[in-house]
Image (cartoon, rainbow, N blue to C red):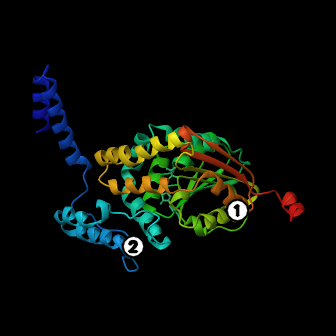
């Protein structure tokens, strides 16, 4: 079928409109064949027991999806503004957590591809910049929290020698993708993986030399708690590096980027991912992420010192570097 369409496309040389029409049909066929959601996906979210409001509707859709996907369109129309996930400001912390878990347990395979596409491949440079800001002490553990598909851990592997990398996330599906990527890299530095919640790190106090978190803080429901956990597990003198995205502070950049989030991002993700509702969440979570000053305050309140922040492309991604004070400094200031 595709071959036939392609042949007709070649035959129609010179007639631009006809060629475009063939290309659109070919693209749709490929999209339907390879990019659409499987009809009976096994639902793997947490049980919808304590869920309320529009979120409940979303759960109903998922339950329906496991059986008859044809009911989806009808149910979608019943949700507020045709969106499946409520805004992060409309939900309780428990609901937010459930949404995050669910999104990342489903989004997996398209995650890297869409990251590159939506950021015009800048995401790789941002992670590299973040990782390069740190000079880790040899043989210390580098803990990459909310590691997802391990892109930061892989950058650490490429940029720093003689360290041990521990990559953790609370979604097993993301970790598995990360693990299979790491397996393909010829390296002697091992990366250990673990299913661990950033807000409750199952690690002993003062056990790691560096903590990194990229595009993860935004998804955490109690950021203050997560930052205090990072402080707790860091050795005195250890470094924290955070990479996160927020709306730019400069008004004209803010307008352009808001337009990108509201209009362009959903359109692109709609073309390439069956989980475009997840990408609406992405835009929503960036829009509501607090400004750099607030993150600065959270870091200072947790006890971090030498805090520096670097705005990157278009003031959207930010890199925060902070240090747990060394013992002598901590003792003299206390
Ligand atoms: C946008 S992805 C970022 C992944 C990766 N760090 C990167 O640079 O692409 C966010 C990740 O944070 C994880 N996450 C969100 N909240 C978390 C939490 N409380 N504890 C651990 N991981 C969390 C999600 O499972 C997801 O894999």
- Most foreground residue, 145 or 195: 145
Residue 188 appears in view: no
Q: Identify the residue at the far right of this view.
A: 332
- Judge from the rendering whether residue 322 lies leftward or rightward of residue 242; answer left or right: right
- Most foreground residue, 143 or 295: 295
Residue 120 appears in view: yes
**Residue 78 percent coordinates (x, y):** 24, 67
SS at badge 2: loop
Indicate the quadrant containing the C terminus: top left, top right, bottom left or bottom right. bottom right
- Judge from the rendering whether residue 82 lies leftward or rightward of residue 223; answer left or right: left
Which residue is disc 2 drawn over?
46
Residue ID at (21%, 64%): 72
- Most foreground residue, 315 or 227: 315
Labelled disc at residue 40? none
**Residue 166 percent coordinates (x, y):** 59, 56
| Mark 1 vs 2: CB contact within 8 A | no
Instruction: Give the Cα distance between marks 1 and 2.
Output: 30 Å
Which residue is disc 1 drawn over?
231
Q: Identify the residue at the far bottom of this view.
A: 49
**Residue 129 percent coordinates (x, y):** 61, 40
How many numbered marks have been drawn onto this rendered protein structure? 2
| Mark before the other along the chain sequence, 1 or 2 | 2
Packing grade of label 1 (10 A; few <14, some 14-19, many >=20) is: many
**Residue 31 percent coordinates (x, y):** 23, 45
Packing grade of label 2 (10 A; few <14, some 14-19, many >=20) is: few
SS at badge 1: helix
Q: Identify the residue at the far front of this view.
A: 251
């Amino acid at each position: 079928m595709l071959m036939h369409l392609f042949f007709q496309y070649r035959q129609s040389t010179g007639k631009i409109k006809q060629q475009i029409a063939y290309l659109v049909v070919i693209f749709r066929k490929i999209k339907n064949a390879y990019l659409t959601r499987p009809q009976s996906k096994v639902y793997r979210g947490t049980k919808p027991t304590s869920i309320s409001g529009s979120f409940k509707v979303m759960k109903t859709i998922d339950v329906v999806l496991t059986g008859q996907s044809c009911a989806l369109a009808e149910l979608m129309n019943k949700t507020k503004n045709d969106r499946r996930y409520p805004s992060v400001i409309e939900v309780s912390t428990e609901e937010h957590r459930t949404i995050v878990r669910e999104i990342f347990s489903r989004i997996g395979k398209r995650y890297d591809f869409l990251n590159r596409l939506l950021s015009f491949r800048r995401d790789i440079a941002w992670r590299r910049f973040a990782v390069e800001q740190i000079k880790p002490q040899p043989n210390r553990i580098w803990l990459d929290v909310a590691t997802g598909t391990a892109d930061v851990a892989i950058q650490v592997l490429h940029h720093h020698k003689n360290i041990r990398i521990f990559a953790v996330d609370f979604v097993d599906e993301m970790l598995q993708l990360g693990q299979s990527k790491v397996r393909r890299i010829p390296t002697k530095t091992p990366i250990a993986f673990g299913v661990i919640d950033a807000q409750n790190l199952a690690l002993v106090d003062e056990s790691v030399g560096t903590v990194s978190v990229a595009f993860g803080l935004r998804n955490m429901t109690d950021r203050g708690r997560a930052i205090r956990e990072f402080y707790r597990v860091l050795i005195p003198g250890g470094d924290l590096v955070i990479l996160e995205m927020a709306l730019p502070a400069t008004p004209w950049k803010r307008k352009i980027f808001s337009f990108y989030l509201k209009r362009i991002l959903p359109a692109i993700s709609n073309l390439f991912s069956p989980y475009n509702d997840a990408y609406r969440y992405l835009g929503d979570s960036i829009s509501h992420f607090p400004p750099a000053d607030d993150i600065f305050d959270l870091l200072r309140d947790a006890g971090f010192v030498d805090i520096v922040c670097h705005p990157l492309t278009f003031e959207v991604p930010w890199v925060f570097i902070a240090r747990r004070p060394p013992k002598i400094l901590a003792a003299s200031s206390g």
